[in-house]
């Protein structure tokens, strides 16, 4: 009995020994597998023994240029030509001042004020082109002699034949009257301005824009495609609602005692099933002598035909979510469209970054010269700003 117990104890000890050996071998392989593969000794030196983070950062030259004389001298001359390497510790930070940080932030306030001549003919609304409703609205309408608001409240700019027309509409304006005044003074009067439907100080904002010669319009929002991301609110047109409700919202948006030449329809929920109510809306816009700019990503509005409606589809939309690289790409596209078609219409948001980049782009436009003058000057950007009404066709 004692002999059997002794054999059993030995068997248990052997099994435990084998298990410990297997675990030890497995742990060793796991350690080898988790060890990072270094491309060089420098890579290995960069990491501490726990392989957590770099202990030092070695900044090496991207390219080592060796002169022909140094090549002739051999290896020693080559080594001598390599500049000392700077070793930067992780806690080293580049110092900068608060002033430098502020100066690098895009701001409308930094745009320089200009003194452009005002060419617009009607700075204030014409009495015979306002319809006062029983509910207290002031709606634009055709004048007594059939004059249309989009023409009477617009301006015409002459462009030489060898120049391409560029129309820019700055939208979503009105929440900050100071910013509107600043933009109105900074941008050429040929740049048109469109105001948000929830604007509360329309007289100050629209008045400031027109005093500087800008055409003025209203943004017509559609119901948002994504309510969790953006809610366009009760003033947005929801084409799934009753027609009377859609028209009621439309009238409230365009009800302004200041000159409104038309509407800029912004992107939102719209489909082929809404064609009939869209047709009715466009007919009402035509009836009131307004122009319509289609700034949606859909082709529904553009495909609805209404004879006699002053209209235009925006070529490019530069929205507030775009980065500087994306804005730059849109500007390049605008130049290509202008060269290809002779004109381009851009609708933008009022984001400071967009405003600064658009302003800088306009400054690169070549001055308008005759064909003979242009041949001697060698101009590269023959673009001319025009109000949006100049690109509209009835």
Image (cartoon, rainbow, N blue to C red):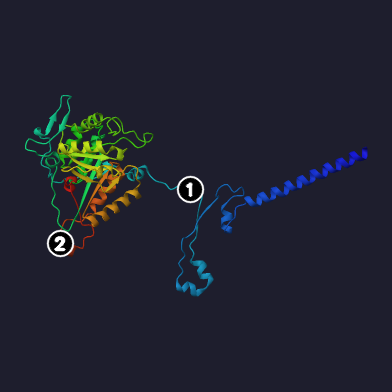
- Please name which of the two marks, 2 or 1, marks the residue nearer to the observer: 2
Q: Is residue 257 visible?
A: no
Residue occupying the far bottom of the picture = 72
Answer with mark 2 or mark 1, whichever residue precedes in sequence.
Answer: 1
Q: Is residue 11 left or right of residue 273?
A: right
On the image, the x and y values in percent for residue 274 come to 28, 37
Q: Tell me the quarter of the picture where residue 137 sits.
A: top left
Closer to the camera in the image, 76 or 351: 351
Would you place residue 61 above or below residue 94 in this image? below
Percent of width and height locating residue 173:
25, 37
CA–CA distance in space, label 2 to label 1: 58 Å
Marking on residue 288: none
How packed mark 2 is, by other alpha carbons closer than 10 Å (few <14, some 14-19, many 20 or more), is: few
Q: How many marks?
A: 2
Counting from the top left corner in percent of width and height, residue 294 is at: 25, 43
Q: Position of residue 151 (x, y in %)?
A: 13, 42
Residue ID at (9%, 32%): 127
Disc 2 + disc 1, Cβ < 8 Å: no
Q: Nearer the viewer, residue 319 or 235?
A: 235
The residue tagged 1 is: 92
Q: Answer above or below: position of 84 versus 246.
A: below
Q: Residues within 10 Å of mark 1 (few under 14, many from 20)?
A: few
- Would residue 161 be visible to someone looking at this image? yes
Image quarter of the C terminus: top left
Q: Quadrant of the N terminus?
A: top right
Q: Considering depth in this image, is 231 or 297 the residue closer to the camera?
A: 297
Q: Residue furthest left?
A: 145
For the residue pair 296 and 170, the one nearer the viewer reads as 296
Secondary element at image label 1: loop
Q: Secondary structure at mark 2?
A: helix
**Residue to which mark 2 is pinned:** 371
């Amino acid at each position: 009995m004692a002999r059997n117990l002794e054999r059993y104890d030995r068997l248990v000890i052997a099994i435990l020994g084998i298990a410990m050996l297997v675990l030890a071998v497995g742990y060793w392989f796991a350690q080898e597998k988790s060890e990072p593969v270094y491309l060089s000794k420098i890579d290995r030196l960069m990491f501490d023994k726990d392989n957590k983070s770099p202990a030092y950062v070695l900044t090496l030259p991207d390219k080592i240029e060796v002169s022909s004389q140094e090549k002739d001298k051999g290896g020693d001359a080559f080594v001598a030509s390599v500049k000392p390497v700077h070793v930067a510790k992780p806690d080293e930070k580049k110092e900068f001042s608060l002033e430098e940080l502020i100066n690098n932030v895009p701001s409308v306030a930094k745009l320089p004020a200009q003194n452009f001549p005002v060419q617009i003919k009607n700075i204030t609304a014409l009495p015979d082109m306002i319809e006062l409703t029983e509910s207290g609205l002031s709606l634009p309408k055709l004048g007594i002699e059939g004059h249309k608001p989009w023409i009477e409240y617009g301006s015409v700019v002459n462009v030489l034949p060898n120049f391409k027309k560029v129309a820019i509409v700055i939208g979503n304006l009105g929440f900050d009257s100071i910013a509107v005044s600043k933009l109105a003074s900074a941008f050429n009067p040929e740049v048109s301005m469109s105001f948000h439907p929830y604007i509360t100080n329309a007289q100050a904002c629209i008045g400031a824009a027109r005093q500087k010669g800008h055409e003025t319009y209203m943004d017509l929002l559609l119901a948002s495609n994504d309510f969790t991301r953006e809610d366009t609110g009760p003033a947005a047109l929801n084409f799934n609602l009753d027609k009377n409700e859609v028209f009621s919202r439309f009238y409230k948006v365009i009800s302004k005692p200041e000159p409104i030449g038309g509407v800029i329809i912004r992107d939102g929920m719209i489909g082929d099933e809404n064609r009939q109510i869209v047709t009715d809306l466009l007919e009402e816009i035509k009836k009131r002598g307004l122009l319509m700019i289609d700034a949606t990503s859909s082709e529904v509005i553009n495909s609805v035909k209404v004879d006699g409606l002053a209209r235009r589809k925006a070529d490019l939309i530069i929205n507030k979510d775009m980065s500087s690289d994306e804005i730059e790409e849109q500007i390049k596209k605008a130049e290509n469209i202008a060269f290809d078609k002779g004109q381009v219409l851009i609708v933008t948001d009022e984001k400071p970054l967009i405003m600064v980049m658009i302003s800088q782009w306009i400054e690169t436009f070549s001055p308008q010269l005759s064909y003979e003058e242009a041949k001697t000057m060698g101009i590269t950007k023959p673009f001319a700003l025009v109000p949006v009404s100049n690109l509209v066709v009835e």
